């Protein structure tokens, strides 16, 4: 079974859709893939890039054109209206930064400008993704899980369970990025705590220079609380696309059993390459249910 067929049969909306399939063919030598798994800060980063006048494209909900322009796909209006990341035409059409939750093999053969890897502590990323899938999307397959621990161990859209899927995704992109002409790695935590140097360094890797003052202003306008309030105004105060946007939230709910799951050797080794120590077990909450 090919990767594409597996994605289509197992959680299509989790990682892949027909719109993205069509858009892949329109990617070219001036496109930068922003590669992350869900709930790793992609919406937050996209908002800031758009606030800076850069061309951030959501290839899952927009029609991309080879001249760099894009237009909303009406089928996803409800989703897009909740976030409203994309406003006026960008001041800088190139490079175009294109959202992706797919592994490199899906983009094989495309002459890309580079890749920007966005990563978040897997404890927070996977927990937020679990809450998004079960509370906002309310996917029937995800809701079969009896708890977060159970969900982590169930097969995701690639056939791997969620922990191995996280490790596989970022391992593949690290390997691939070393063979691309331009690449950058940004952690969600750096983006939240010190956005100016995090964004400045990453953008320079793609030949984009933005004054620090403009970066700081865009980060302020893209603040999670502002964007979440906007989403609540459009979609109500219930579960949303954005949840908390908090680094190290895992410290408030981590349990011994969940920490054991994150203790897989290959997962901890890869996480350490991004600066995450998964052997920490501090918690202040009552568990994940």
Image: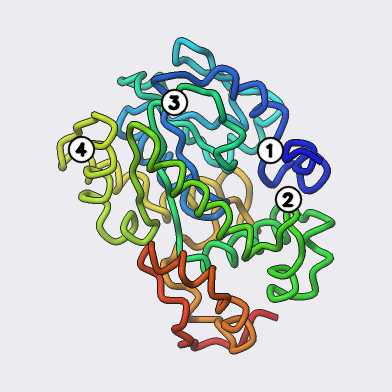
Q: Nearer the viewer, residue 235 or 216?
A: 216
Q: Quadrant of residue 266?
A: bottom right
Whichever of callouts 4 and 3 sits on the residue coming sooner in the sequence is 3
Mark 3 or 1: the one toward you: 3
Cα–Cα gap, marks 2 and 4: 39 Å
Q: Which residue is located at x 71 percent, y 58 percent?
A: 160
Q: Which residue is mark 4?
A: 214
Q: Nearer the viewer, residue 189 or 280?
A: 280
Q: Check disc 4: other Cα within 10 Å, few if <14, some if 14-19, many if 20+.
A: some
Q: Viewer-proximal residue, 26 or 273? A: 273
Question: Mark 2 or mark 3, which has the lower sequence index?
Answer: 3
Numbered circle sitting on residue 257? none
Q: Which residue is mark 3?
A: 112
Q: Which mark is residue 16?
A: 1
Name the N-terminal-most of marks 1 and 2: 1
Q: Quarter-wise, where is residue 53 in the image?
A: top left
Q: Quadrant of the C terminus?
A: bottom right
Q: Is residue 188 left or right of residue 237?
A: left
Across and down, in percent, residue 60 comes to 62, 32
Q: Quick check: 139 above or below 200? A: below
Sequence-first disc among 2 and 4: 2
Q: Secondary structure at mark 2?
A: loop
Say which residue label 2 marks: 157
Mark 3 or mark 1: name the one nearer the start of the chain: 1
Tell me how many marks there are: 4
């Amino acid at each position: 079974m090919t990767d594409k067929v597996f994605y289509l049969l197992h959680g299509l909306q989790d990682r892949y859709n027909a719109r993205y399939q069509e858009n892949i063919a329109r990617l070219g030598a001036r496109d930068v893939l922003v590669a992350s798994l869900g709930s790793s800060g992609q919406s937050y980063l996209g908002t800031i890039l758009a606030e800076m006048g850069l061309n951030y494209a959501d290839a899952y909900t927009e029609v991309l054109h080879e001249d760099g322009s894009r237009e909303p796909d009406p089928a996803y209006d409800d989703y897009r209206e909740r976030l409203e990341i994309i406003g006026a035409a960008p001041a800088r059409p190139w490079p175009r930064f294109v959202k992706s939750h797919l592994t490199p093999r899906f983009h094989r053969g495309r002459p890309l400008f580079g890749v920007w890897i966005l990563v978040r502590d897997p404890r927070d990323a996977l927990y937020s993704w679990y809450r998004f899938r079960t509370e906002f999307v309310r996917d029937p397959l995800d809701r079969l899980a009896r708890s977060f621990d159970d969900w982590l161990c169930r097969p995701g859209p690639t056939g791997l369970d969620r922990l191995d899927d996280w490790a596989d995704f970022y391992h593949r992109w690290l390997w691939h990025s070393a063979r691309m002409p331009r690449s950058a790695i940004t952690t969600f935590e750096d983006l939240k705590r010190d956005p100016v140097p995090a964004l400045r360094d990453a953008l320079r890797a793609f030949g984009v220079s933005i004054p620090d003052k403009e970066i700081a202003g865009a980060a302020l306008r893209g603040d999670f609380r502002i964007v979440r309030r906007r989403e609540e105004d459009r979609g109500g105060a219930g579960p949303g696309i954005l949840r908390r946007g908090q680094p190290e939230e895992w410290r408030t709910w981590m349990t011994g059993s969940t920490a054991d799951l994150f203790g897989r050797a290959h997962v901890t080794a890869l996480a350490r390459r991004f600066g995450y120590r998964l052997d920490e077990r501090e918690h202040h909450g009552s568990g994940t249910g």
